[in-house]
Amino acid sequence: MTIEYQDRGVIKYNGFYLSDHTERLDKEKESKKVNPRKMQMDSDEIGTILTEAARSNLEVAIQKEERDLNGNYPDDISGKINGYDELGIFVGNQKVNYDEIRNIEIISFKKWSSLS
């Protein structure tokens, strides 16, 4: 008795097509995300917030003075300040030069017990 394999043809590839299509749509959606332009801060304001965040070990969110070809700002760099040198600061695993900072803010977290 010989069992012959019947190829399902195109049907078996529809799953691959669907996952590729979904992945492509997700990438397009991600590329259409636009971060709002935040207020340009002067160096004194930036220095004050950097000092407070470093002293109190608080997390910051930094918008860099950088845009893509469409004029959109990249995602904020966020995390705790891990160190600094004469040119910039280290936030998380990234270095941000002082002259690249457009806006910086301290990230405030709400206690889970106060959320409704």
Image (cartoon, rainbow, N blue to C red):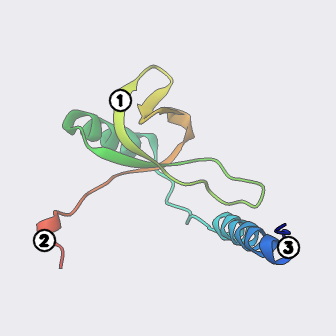
Residue 20 to residue 66: above or below: below
Q: CA distance from mark 2 to mark 1?
A: 29 Å
Residue 67 percent coordinates (x, y): 68, 52
Q: Is residue 70 left or right of residue 41?
A: right
Q: In this view, which residue lies farthest toward the front?
A: 1
In which quadrant will I find the C terminus? Answer: bottom left
Q: Which residue is mark 3?
A: 6
Q: Residues within 10 Å of mark 3 (few under 14, many from 20)?
A: few
Q: Nearer the viewer, mark 3 or mark 2?
A: 3
Amino acid type shown at disc 1: Asn
Q: CA distance from mark 1 to mark 3?
A: 61 Å
Mark 1 / mark 3, whichever is N-terminal: 3
- Which element type, helix, strand or loop, lies under badge 1? strand
Query: Which one is nearer the viewer's eye here, 33 or 67?
Result: 33
Residue 25 image point, x, y percent: 71, 72
Residue appearing at x 69%, y 66% in the figure:
23
Closest to the observer, 101 or 5: 5
Structural distance between the alpha carbons of marks 3 and 2: 61 Å
Q: Which residue is mark 2?
A: 114
Asked if disc 1 and disc 3 are in contact, CB closer than 8 Å, the reply is no
Q: Which mark is residue 82?
A: 1
Q: Residue at x 75, y 71 (%)?
A: 21
Q: Secondary structure at mark 2?
A: helix
Q: Say what amino acid the circle numbered 3 marks.
A: Gln
- Image point (28%, 34%), residue name: 54
Please identify the quarter of the rendering in which residue 9 is found. Answer: bottom right
Q: Is residue 98 left or right of residue 68?
A: left
Residue that sits furthest to the top in the current view? 86
